Amino acid sequence: MSFLQVYVDYDAEQPLVATRDGERIAKELGDRGIRFERWATRELAPDADQEAVLAAYEAEVSRLQAESGMVGADVIGLTPDHPDKQVLREKFLHEHRHSEDEVRFFVRGEGIFYLHLDDRVYVVGCAQGDLMSVPAGTPHWFDMGPEPDFTAIRLFSDTTGWVADFTGATLAERFPRFEALPTGQEAA
């Protein structure tokens, strides 16, 4: 289930905001220039390939591409049996930026974005049906959990793939990880 927690960047213990209300999440993030939407989900086979997933969400993806100028879309996913799951998790747990917007739609499963905006950290738990767009240049990190199990559509304008500019900041080390947050649990 989706959630938002907002912290002062020096205090990862007590959130200033904690909500699971989708409209409030969208407003809080929208006030900071972050796009968050809930899309209607589609019934897909557990082993649906990229073509089937993109076809199921063709209207939404096309609309978003027309609005944003994104030219490409693909499907990524990880399962708990992936041999490199820990290496991949560690890669995304360090604060970084991108030269283009990072746009993800969660077809199934969940993951957590951490957005470092000025002196605040916005912890956004995304679940099936959530679209998250992190603007270019926004310091952030992502946690897929110790047993990642998700499928997401990625939209992009640069076909070179995922390119990160790591900030070197250690802030991410002080914030609770996936397993300590309310993913699939009651809100904090």
Image (cartoon, rainbow, N blue to C red):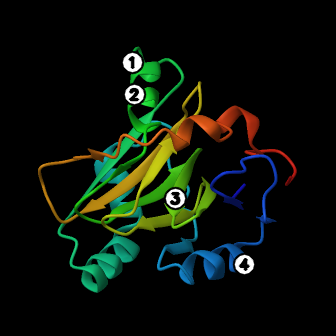
Q: Pointers 1 and 2 in contact (CB under 8 A)?
A: yes
Judged from the image, the secondary structure of the residue bearing numbered disc 4 is helix
Q: Position of residue 126 (x, y in %)?
A: 60, 55
Task: Determine crowd level at label 4: few under 14, some 14-19, many 20+ residues with C-alpha closer than 10 A.
Answer: few
Residue plotted at (50% across, 28% down): 79
| Image coords of residue 88 (percent x, y) | 39, 28
Along the horizontal axis of the image, is 166 left or right of 150? left
Judging by the rendered image, the residue that carries numbered circle 4 is: 24
Number of the label disc, if any, that sits on residue 84: 1
Residue density around tag 3, few if under 14, some if 14–19, many if 20 or more, within 10 Å:
many
Q: For the residue labelled by badge 1, is the local secondary structure a helix, a strand or a loop? A: loop
Q: Disc 3 and disc 4: Cα gap in Å? A: 17 Å
The numbered dot on residue 88 is 2
Q: Earlier in the sequence, mark 1 or mark 4?
A: 4
Check disc 3 and report the residue beneath it.
115
Q: Is residue 4 visible?
A: no
